[in-house]
Image (tube, helix red, strand yellow):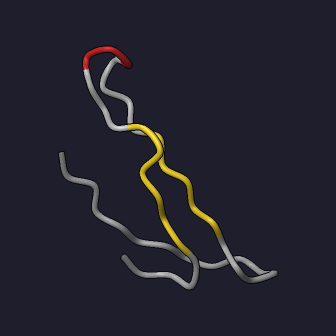
Amino acid sequence: MEGRGTIELIQQPDSANNYTAVVRVTDRGPSREEYRFTLVW
C-alpha cells in the first residue's frame, strides 16, 4: 500500500455479493493524494 492514510477491506468478494469487494480509503490530509494498493483473494 502507498499513500498517507489507511485502506481497509470492508467486505470480501464472494458468491453472495456477486464477487464485489468493498474498500474504504481514509485520507488524513486536506488535499488530494494518490493511493496504490493490491487486492488479492
Rendered position, 17 above or below 35: above
Q: Residue furthest left?
A: 41
Left or right of 20 on screen, residue 35: right
Most foreground residue, 28 or 33: 28
Left or right of 26 on screen, residue 3: left
At x 42%, y 51%, the residue is 9
Rendered position, 18 above or below 37: above
At x 35%, y 67%, the residue is 37
The image quadrant of residue 13 is top left
Q: Residue furthest right?
A: 30
Where's residue 5, x and y in %?
Answer: 58, 78
Left or right of 12 on screen, residue 10: right
Where's residue 34, x and y in %?
Answer: 55, 76
Where's residue 3, x and y in %?
Answer: 50, 81
Rendered position, 33 above or below 23: below
At x 38%, y 19%, the residue is 17
Where is the C terminus found, in terms of image quarters?
top left
Where's residue 36, x and y in %?
Answer: 41, 71
Where is the N terminus found, in terms of image quarters?
bottom left
> What number of labels is visible?
0
Rendered position, 23 above or below 35: above
The image quadrant of residue 27 is bottom right
Left or right of 38 on screen, residue 4: right
